[in-house]
Amino acid sequence: NGKVVLTSNLKESRPFDERANLVIQIRDDNCKTWREPIPVTTPDEHIFYPHSAVDYEKKIFYLAYENARQFYINVYTCDELGL
């Protein structure tokens, strides 16, 4: 029912070392407003290439991202995200 967007809160294109603060944003009112962002990383963590996948049967949301040295995978239930 919801629309999920991963964003690093950039207003314009920036170099890799300035990409930080990954959040999950959700909207579910026909794209009129956004819910409060759900932080994934801290503002000082530089991240690249976030990817997500949903297991609809198990109702699990997977989020993968990296920082050029290490890969991360976060797992959320759809209930946790209010989906």
Image (cartoon, rainbow, N blue to C red):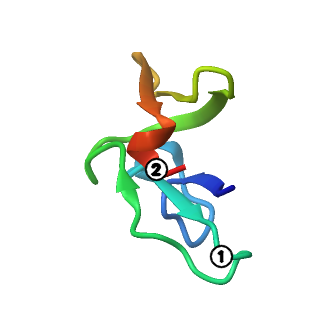
- Residue type marked 2: Arg
Return the x and y of residue 73 as percentages of the image width and height.
Answer: 45, 20
Question: Residue 60: which quarter of the image?
Answer: top right
Q: In which quadrant is the N terminus drawn? A: bottom right
Is residue 20 shown above or below 49? below
| Residue 67 visible in the snapshot | no
Q: Point out which mark residue 69 bears.
A: none
Residue 32 is left or right of residue 79, and the answer is right
* Residue on which disc 1 sits: 29
Residue 75 percent coordinates (x, y): 44, 25
Q: Is residue 31 above or below residue 71?
A: below
Where residue 46 sits, quadrant-wise, is top left
* SS state under label 1: loop
Side (left or right) of 6 relative to 3: left
Q: Residue at x 46, y 52 (%)?
A: 82
Q: Residue furthest top?
A: 70
Residue that badge 2 annotates: 19
**Percent x, y of residue 11:** 56, 72
Callout 1 amino acid? Asp
Given the current orientation, which residue lies at the most extreme right position? Answer: 30
The answer to whether 40 is drawn above or below residue 4 in the figure is above
x 57%, y 36%: residue: 50
Nearer to me, 57 or 32: 57
Disc 2 crowd, CA 10 A, few/some/many (<14, 14-19, 20+): many
In the image, residue 51 sits, relative to residue 29, either above or below, namely above
Tell which of 29 and 63 is nearer to you: 29
